[in-house]
Image (spheres, helix red, strand yellow):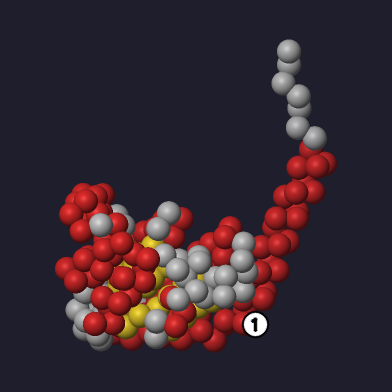
Amino acid sequence: MAAREPDMPDLLARVREEIEESVAVKRAALDVCGASIARAVGVVIETFRDGGKLLAFGNGGSAADAQHLAAELAGRYVRERPGLPALALTANSSDVTAIGNDYGFDRVFARLIEAHGRAGDVAVAISTSGNSPNVLAGVEAARELELRTVGLTGSGGGELAGMVDVPVVVPSDATPRVQEMHITVVHLICALVDETLFPRAGGV
């Protein structure tokens, strides 16, 4: 029996609905947390300007966002410039599994912050709920070591929003919409770091 062809008008309607919802969340985020995003970018810029590094971490899709951020900074976003010291604490599976096995999964990011973090660095913690225990423990370790802290979250911010120097709380409870805004913030960080620290002759 032949597979039923998808109903294209229904699929198009759903595509439109999802994109319009995403756009609405981004517009709301601009109003609600645009200033916080600018502050977060400023913290990252100052960290690199002062010779510090960026450490990013999160779980699942947020781990992917952390790795995306580190890759664009250490590699290249758009313009040619020197690589920047940025690490995703989720990228080394041997680190994550060894620490998880020996100390418990809740201590994974805290232990890696202890290993790599120094006063003046910036920790970028990413959690859509703001309540991931290992992310919160990572922020605690960062604060103890006098790192600057930025939190990307949603759903009202959770505990993370009250723990970091700069919380960016996306005004949505829908995980996909929050994650879409987080990747927009990642790109804003990369673009504005490039423009500020590596200006082109005659303008940005």
Closest to the observer, 167 or 137? 137
Residue 147 seen in render: no
Say above or below: 167 vs 184. below
Q: How many marks?
A: 1
Q: Secondary structure at mark 1?
A: helix
Say above or below: 120 vs 64. below
Closest to the observer, 74 or 56? 56
Circle 1 sits on which residue?
A: 31
Residue 10 seen in render: yes
Identify the residue at image location x=42%, y=71%.
190
Residue 59: quadrant of the picture: bottom left
Name which residue type carries label 1.
Asp
Q: Residue furthest right?
A: 9
Identify the residue at image location x=54%, y=70%.
154
Dot 1 alpha-carbon crowd within 10 angstroms: few under 14, some 14 to 19, many 20 or more: few
Residue 31: quadrant of the picture: bottom right
In the rendered image, residue 39, in percent from the top left (x then y), is placed at: 46, 86
Left or right of 83 on screen, residue 172: right
Identify the residue at image location x=79%, y=38%.
8
In the rendered image, residue 56, in percent from the top left (x then y), is placed at: 34, 67
Say above or below: 1 vs 65. above
In the rendered image, residue 140, in percent from the top left (x then y), is placed at: 30, 77
In the rendered image, residue 128, in percent from the top left (x then y), is placed at: 50, 65
Q: Quadrant of the N terminus?
A: top right
Left or right of 71 on screen, residue 53: left
Identify the residue at image location x=76%, y=24%.
4
Closest to the observer, 78 or 149? 149
Left or right of 68 on screen, residue 37: right
